[in-house]
Structures are given as structure tokens and as C-alpha cells.
Amino acid sequence: MCDNCDKIREEMWAEIRDLLNYNRRTKGPLAEELAESLADIRVQAEEAGREIDDDDLAVYTEALRAELIAMRCAFIARTCNNTEWHGRPPSFVLGAWAGQSMQMEQSHSLAANLLRRLFEEG
């Protein structure tokens, strides 16, 4: 693996850990940036005469954290030599993963339906 790939992987893993530890009192750089951005959004909403509910903000924060983590996982996958993901754009990796997940879910659904029919008939 090249030095640049090693560096990117280390950075992405550090950012993932930071995002996973978002709710800790002391935040890392990416989590701190995310918290500041969300605070700015809240201020902008209040200036516009709209209030953001704490529960709504928590849900939005979780969804955004998940998206940021997924993107970093795709960056890690693209740095892995001798894989189908090596050098591919992160969007390609994410799309391929989504496609594979959909195929697995469809296979599980078909298998479950087949088993249910067999048990109903037997």
C-alpha cells in the first residue's frame, strides 16, 4: 500500500472514531466542527423566527454523523489494494455497497417467502 493510502486510511479512521465519540464532553476536531455547524444552524433558524426542537436536532445530528462515517468508510475501502474498490470514487463504493445490500435483502426475502410457503403446504 502506498504512503498516501496509509495516510488517508489513518486520517479516515481517526475521523470515524471522532464521530463515534461525538457525545463525549471533549470532542475531536471533526466532531467539534459538526457541533459548531449545528449550533450555527440553530442560531440561523432562530434569527429567521423558527425554532428547532432538540429532538429534531438530535435526529438530524445522528443522520449526518452516519452519512459522514459512511463516506469515510468508502474512502478507506478505496485505499485497499487488490480489491474491486481500489481507486474508485467514494460515491461508486457507496453505490455498489447499496446495490449489494439490496440484492442480499431481496434474496433473504425470497428465501423467507419460499420457506413460509413450504411450511404452509407441509
Image (cartoon, helix red, strand yellow):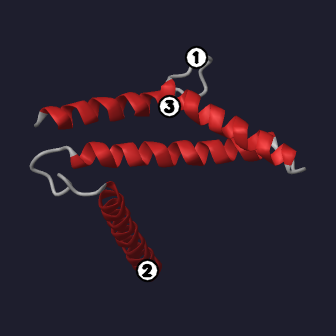
Q: Residue furthest right?
A: 49
In front of the other: label 2 or label 3?
3
Pick whichever, 3 or 70, lies toward us: 3
Instruction: Give the residue type at disc 3.
Output: Leu
Q: Label 2, on which residue?
A: 117
Q: Secondary structure at mark 3?
A: helix
Query: Quick check: 69 above or below 16?
Result: below
**Residue receiving disc 1:** 26
Image quarter of the C terminus: bottom left
* Residue at mark 3: 30
In the image, what residue type sits under mark 1? Thr
The span from disc 3 to disc 1 (Cα, nearest Å) is 12 Å
Q: Position of residue 70 (x, y in %)?
A: 42, 47
Q: Is residue 52 visible?
A: no
Image quarter of residue 42:
top right
Mark before the other along the chain sequence, 2 or 1? 1
Of circles 2 and 1, the one toward us is: 1
Q: Give percent across and percent down for residue 30.
A: 50, 31
Residue depicted at 30% across the width and 62% down the height: 92
